[in-house]
Image: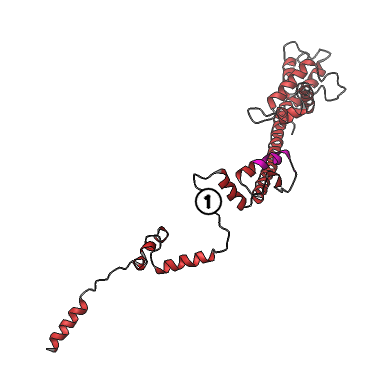
C-alpha cells in the first residue's frame, strides 16, 4: 500500500503544471487598459521605468518636432527654442565682417541656425579658403620651377635674355595679374606656360625686341641657334675648311665656342 501511494505521488509530481500568462493590463479599468501609450510596455517593471523617466523630465523644457504638416510658424518656434537669434542682425560673429558673412546671415536665420552653428560654419569656410590659397600658391611655384627647368634646357646660356624678352613682350598684351592668375587647359598659368614663353621669345627675336638693349647678354645664342650657326660654318667653301683663308682661325674659334653653347644646358 505504501508503495502504491509513493507511485501515485511521483506521477502527480511528474505531470506538467499548466501555466497561464497574465496580461498586466487586464487588472486595469477598461478606460485605461486600451490606452495607446501603454501598448509598448510589456510588464510592470517596464511601466515603472517609464514612470521614473517621465518624472525626471518634469520641469524641463521639451521641444516637440513638427510633422510634415507643420507650418513655418511651427518651425520658427522650434528654431527659436534651439537658440536662433530673433533676427539675422543679432548674430555675433568673431572675425572680419566681410560682405560674404553679411549676406550669409539672413540665409542662416532662414535655416534656423543658432549663433554657435553659424560661427563654426564660418570658421570652417575661412580655414578652407586659407588652405586653398596655400595650395594654389604651391601649384604656381611648382609650375614656375618646372617651366624654368624646361626653358633653361631649351635656351641654355640665353635663358635670362630670352625669358626676359619674352615676358616684356607678353606684358604688352596681358596684365601682370592675367599672367599670374589666368589658368590654361593644362593647369598652367599664362606666365608659367612653356609654349607661350617660347612663342613670345621667338616673336621678340623676330621683332628685334632684345637688340636695342645695352645688355651684354643680348647676343647669347640658344643651343639650337648655335647648332644652326655651326651648320653654316660646315658648308663647303666656308673659311673653316680653307686654311689659307684669312678668317680660317676665327672660324675654328667660333665653331669651338658654338659647340660649347650647343652642348650646354644651364643648371
Residue at screen point 61% across, 46% down:
112
Extreme right residue here? 214
Count of numbered labels shown in the rendering: 1
Secondary element at image label 1: loop
Quarter placement of the N terminus: bottom left
**Residue furthest top as drawn:** 237
The percent coordinates of residue 29 (x first, y second) are 37, 66
Asked whether residue 264 appears in the rendered view, the answer is no
Q: How is the image coloured?
A: secondary structure
Crowd class of label 1 (few under 14; some 14 to 19; many from 20; radius 10 Å):
few
- Residue bounds of the magenta highlight: 97-106
Find the residue positioned furthest to the bottom. Answer: 2
Residue tagged 1: 65
Q: Position of residue 190 (x, y in %)?
A: 71, 27
Q: Is residue 103 magenta?
A: yes
The main secondary structure of the magenta stretch is helix
Classify 120 as above or below 185: below
> Looking at the picture, how far across and down is residue 191, in whole percent?
73, 28
**Vertical relation: 26 (above or below) 212:** below
Residue 225: image location, x then y, percent: 74, 20
42 magenta-colored: no
Query: Residue 127 sits in which quadrant?
Result: top right
Does 54 sit left or right of 242 as displayed?
Answer: left
Quarter of the image with the C terminus is top right
Left or right, residue 188 beside residue 6: right
Q: Specify whether residue 253 is in view.
A: yes
Taking depth in this image into account, of 160 and 57 the one nearest to the observer is: 57
Observer-nearest residue: 69 or 262? 69
Residue 111 occupies quadrant: top right
| Viewer-proximal residue among 24 and 261 | 24
Q: Quadrant of residue 215?
A: top right
Identity of the residue drawn at 79% across and 18% down: 251
Amino acid at each position: 500500500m505504501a508503495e502504491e501511494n509513493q507511485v501515485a505521488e511521483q506521477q502527480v509530481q511528474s505531470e506538467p503544471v499548466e501555466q497561464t500568462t497574465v496580461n498586466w493590463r487586464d487588472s486595469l479599468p477598461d478606460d485605461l487598459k486600451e490606452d495607446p501609450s501603454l501598448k509598448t510596455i510589456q510588464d510592470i517593471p517596464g511601466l515603472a521605468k517609464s514612470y521614473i523617466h517621465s518624472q525626471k523630465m518634469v520641469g524641463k523644457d521639451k521641444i516637440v518636432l513638427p510633422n510634415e504638416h507643420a507650418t513655418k510658424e511651427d518651425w520658427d518656434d522650434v528654431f527659436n527654442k534651439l537658440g536662433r537669434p530673433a533676427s539675422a542682425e543679432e548674430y555675433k560673429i568673431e572675425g572680419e565682417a566681410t560682405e560674404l558673412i553679411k549676406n550669409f546671415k539672413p540665409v542662416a536665420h532662414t535655416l534656423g541656425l543658432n549663433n554657435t552653428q553659424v560661427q563654426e560654419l564660418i570658421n570652417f569656410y575661412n580655414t578652407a579658403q586659407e588652405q586653398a590659397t596655400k595650395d594654389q600658391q604651391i601649384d604656381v611655384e611648382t609650375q614656375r620651377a618646372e617651366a624654368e627647368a624646361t626653358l633653361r634646357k631649351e635656351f641654355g646660356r640665353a635663358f635670362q635674355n630670352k625669358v626676359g624678352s619674352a615676358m616684356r613682350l607678353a606684358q604688352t598684351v596681358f596684365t601682370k595679374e592675367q599672367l599670374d592668375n589666368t589658368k590654361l587647359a593644362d593647369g598652367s598659368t599664362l606666365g608659367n606656360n612653356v609654349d607661350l614663353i617660347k612663342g613670345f621669345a621667338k616673336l621678340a627675336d623676330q621683332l628685334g625686341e632684345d637688340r636695342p638693349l645695352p645688355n651684354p647678354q643680348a647676343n647669347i645664342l640658344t643651343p639650337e641657334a648655335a647648332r644652326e650657326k655651326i651648320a653654316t660654318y660646315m658648308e663647303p667653301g666656308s673659311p673653316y675648311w680653307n686654311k689659307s683663308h684669312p678668317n680660317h682661325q676665327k672660324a675654328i674659334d667660333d665653331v669651338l665656342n658654338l659647340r660649347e653653347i650647343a652642348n650646354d644646358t644651364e643648371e
